[in-house]
Amino acid sequence: MTDAISAETRRADRARAELISDIRKIKQMGDEMIEKTEAAVHKAPVLIGLGAVGLALVGVAVLVGRRPKPRLFGFQPPRSFFAEAARGAALSALGVISGRLTQRLLTSALEDSTQKA
């Protein structure tokens, strides 16, 4: 009879230990989720700002490219130097911003993966 009681006691102790281990894992996962959420909240304004700047640059490039041009005797005059410069600068800045954003996202992804390993 004492063997049956001691076996039940051992099983109950093992079950308690597994339950505590599971609770600790769930708490650790919750802490990681909170940390990632906080990091995302801190990065969100920067990413939204970069997106707005990128959108503005695309808008400038599109508006400069689609501006109505007067036609002289059926021929289309060449675009002004300033219109071409504004379009080129907007597209160049958009390329630089998208490159930096991609680099930053890849760097943060690599840092996250090395911290987990």
Image (cartoon, grey):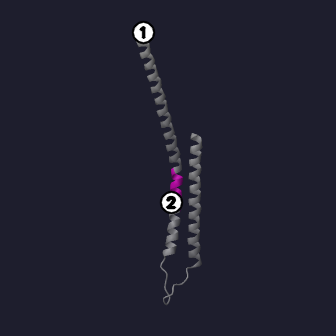
Work out whether 112 lies above or below 15.
below
Stretch in magenta: 44-53
* Label 2 Cα crowd, 10 Å radius (few <14 / some 14-19 / many 20+): few
Q: Main SS of the magenta segment?
A: helix
Work out whether 45 lies above or below 18.
below
Q: Position of residue 67 (x, y in %)?
A: 49, 76
User: Dividing the image into 4 quarters, which one contains the N terminus?
Assistant: top left
Q: Which mark is residue 112?
A: none
Q: Position of residue 53 (x, y in %)?
A: 53, 61
Name which of mark 1 and mark 2 comes first in the sequence.
1
Compute the Cα span from label 1 to label 2.
74 Å
* Label 1 Cα crowd, 10 Å radius (few <14 / some 14-19 / many 20+): few
Q: Residue at x 52, y 70 (%)?
A: 61
Q: Position of residue 65 (x, y in %)?
A: 51, 74
Dot 1: element? helix
Q: Which residue is mark 2?
A: 52
**Camera-nearest label, 1 or 2:** 1
User: Dividing the image into 4 quarters, which one contains the C terminus?
Assistant: top right
Q: Residue at x 51, y 64 (%)?
A: 56
Q: Which residue is mark 1?
A: 2
Nearest the eye: 49 or 92: 92
Please say whether residue 46 is one of the residues in the magenta stretch.
Answer: yes
- In this rendering, the count of numbered labels is 2
Marks 1,2: beta carbons within 8 A: no
> Which kind of residue does numbered mark 2 sit on?
Ala
> Which kind of residue does numbered mark 1 sit on?
Thr
